[in-house]
Image: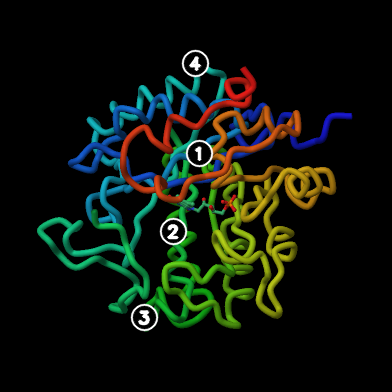
Amino acid sequence: MTAKLFTPLQAGALALRNRVVMAPLTRNRATPDGVVPGPLAPTYYGQRAGFGLIVSEGTQISHQGQGYAWTPGIYSAAQVERWRPVTEAVHANGGTIVAQIWHVGRVSHTSLQPGDGAPVGPSALTADTRTFDGERFVPTSIDQFMRPSVNVRTDAYGGSVENRTRFLEEVVEAVAGAIGGDRVGLRLSPFSPANGVVVDETAPEIFARGIERIAPYGLAFLHMIEGATGGSRELPAGASIEALRALFPGVYIANNGYDREMAIEAVDSGRADAVAFGKLAIANPDLVERLRRNATLNEADRATFYGGGAEGYTDYPTAEAVEA
Ligand SMILES: Cc1cc2nc3c(=O)[nH]c(=O)nc-3n(C[C@H](O)[C@H](O)[C@H](O)COP(=O)(O)O)c2cc1C
């Protein structure tokens, strides 16, 4: 019997041919001026068209929204044109791709900002993290307004749970208003201490309220990082992914530390509608086929995650090439 993981899924306006999703993956290979996809991007994404859905690398919505060197933007007509060969390569191979649009907020550096200005964020607090200085939709990780450790505002965007979740709803409302909610997805990391945020006891309530607020917009999907990004799947006391998922009426995409067996179980049991893979998507352009056949997987080489050229980007072999 075919595992449900390999069966089609309708996510809002998006028709996915299977439920294996490529998670958003920053690769810092945009052209040296840092604003358009690099020359190998169409090959890289085209190789991965077998995924039911590709979520692009984080793509800034303005110069100010950039937090890392050599990440692409999508805020000018010229940049949109440079994304076209990427989407065409994916579509030519029968795939579906959406853009992860982001504004990194405070996770930036003056050297990356217009006029060398200070990065903007909910409050004037420095993120305890490092940045790398060297067609449609939106999962964002703009949760900085929701965290007491990052947001100490006293205006309508800080303080109460209502105020902390206001920015999230306004972003979703604006994007859904522009392109239709059924083309918009949202990525949340409710219990991840990434980028210097402190996950405190307010997280379950704030994220529950945030999801309740965006539920009426008919989004294509909710995508959550279960646990600490790229780390433990364990949740703090009182936290529950299932409880948050239950508040969202649409498609749920699970992510973080999934392997084949876990992904098949999650979708068969109904705990998730689809599963996103990060590191395995970097290392296995044909991941869906490999999972289907239970073939051996390539391992991702961390040394080539960020920056560089074809090595560790477009040269991971397919199982077919390895066997030949
Ligand atoms: C090289 C690399 C780049 C990443 N870039 C992004 C990004 O641009 N946006 C984002 O939301 N998450 C990003 N992530 C997090 C992944 O989407 C994913 O949540 C994480 O790798 C956990 O999934 P995995 O265990 O399947 O690898 C990145 C992770 C890695 C390893």
Q: CA distance from mark 3 to mark 4?
A: 47 Å
Residues tagged 3 and 4 counted as in contact (Cβ below 8 A): no
First reached walking from the N terminus: tag 3 or tag 4: 4
Q: Position of residue 36 (x, y in %)?
A: 27, 36
Alpha carbon distance from label 1 to label 2: 14 Å
- Local crowd size for mark 3, using a 10 Å CA cut-off: few (<14), some (14–19), many (≥20): some
Q: Is residue 218 above or below residue 316?
A: below
Residue at image mark 2 = 170
The structure residue drawn at horizontal position 70% and vertical position 64%, both measured from the top left corner, is 241
For the question of whether residue 101 can be seen, the reply is no
Q: Looking at the image, is mark 3 or mark 1 nearer the viewer?
A: 3
Of the image marks 1 and 2, the number of the one nearer the N terminus: 2
Q: Earlier in the sequence, mark 3 or mark 2?
A: 3
Is residue 84 at all visible to an observer of this figure?
yes
* Mark toward the viewer: 3 or 4: 4
Mark 4 Cα-neighbour bin, 10 Å: few <14, some 14–19, many ≥20: few
Q: Nearer the N terminus, badge 3 or badge 1?
A: 3
Residue contact between numbered discs 3 and 2, judged by CB atoms under 8 Å: no
In this view, 126 is above or below 34: below
The 10 Å Cα crowd at callout 2, few under 14, some 14 to 19, many 20 or more, is few
Where is mark 4, residue-wise?
92
Disc 2 residue lies near ligand 1 with CB under 8 A: no
**Closer to the eye: label 3 or 2:** 3
Q: Which residue is mark 1?
A: 180
Q: Amino acid at mark 3?
A: Arg
Quadrant assignment, res 34:
top left
* Residue at which label 3 appears: 153
Give amino acid for label 4: Ala
* Dot 1 alpha-carbon crowd within 10 angstroms: few under 14, some 14 to 19, many 20 or more: some
Q: Nearer the viewer, residue 217 or 318?
A: 318
